[in-house]
Amino acid sequence: MKFAATSAVFFSLAGLVASATIAKRNCPQAARFGGLSAFPVTVSPGDFNTQSITVSVNLNCPIEQFGIVPQFLDYTIEVPEASNNGHEQPIVLARRTFNFVPGTIQPTDEFTTQVPHAPFFAGAPYNIVLNMVYPINGTDGSSVLVEGGVSFPITIDA
């Protein structure tokens, strides 16, 4: 009887470890800074009513699995470095403060904005880039702000 109780405890603990491992597998390293998306994926600079873009990021993986709780979320439109001719600076879409409420089932951030009348180049590849600013512990225990990010490709009809 003692063996059965010990076995039950062992298998219960093994199940907990397995479920934690499975949950971790649902958040690959690529999701460390969230799941970024935008709609529509092809836009033109212009009037908000006809050329708006909705940008959203799911922050469940960064917060729940990696312990990254952002303070600020900076969204830009950028040409990837390998394709940038040196004249395409990042264009800021939004800078947002993120306030995490513990117990939130799906922590997200979403907004709709207009693609500005910036100097876009026809045929250039563009990404919406999220730079997440979040605190880590410094070597003396103080808070240090660091940055990490993700990108999502879009097409801009220039």
Image (cartoon, rainbow, N blue to C red):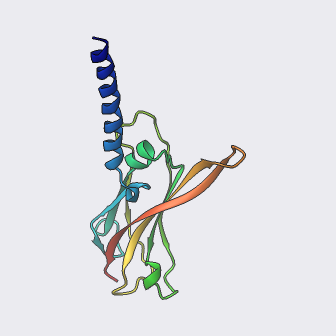
Q: Position of residue 151 (x, y in %)?
A: 40, 66
Q: Nearer the viewer, residue 137 or 87?
A: 137
- Is 89 above or below relative to 69? below
At horizontal 37% and vertical 54% (from top left) the residue drawn is 57
Q: Where residue 109 sits in the image (x, y, percent)? A: 40, 50
Number of marks in the rendered image: 0
Q: Is residue 46 above or below residue 52?
A: below
* Image quadrant assignment for residue 8: top left
Residue sitting at x 62%, y 53%:
145
Q: Residue 131 location in percent, x, y?
A: 49, 61
In which image quadrant can residue 113 be found?
Answer: bottom left
Toward the right, the furthest residue is 140
The residue located at (31%, 76%) in the rendering is 155
Identify the residue at horizontal 34%, vertical 66% (top origin). 48
Q: In the image shown, does 3 or 118 lie closer to the viewer?
A: 3
Farthest-out residue, top: 1
Location of residue 104 in the rendering, given as x and y in whole percent from the top left corner? 39, 36
Q: Is residue 119 visible?
A: no
In the picture, residue 3 is in which quadrant?
top left
Is residue 129 shown above or below 122? Answer: above
> Which of the image's four quarters has the N terminus?
top left
Observer able to see residue 51: yes
Quarter of the image with the C terminus is bottom left
Looking at the image, which is closer to me, 144 or 57?
144
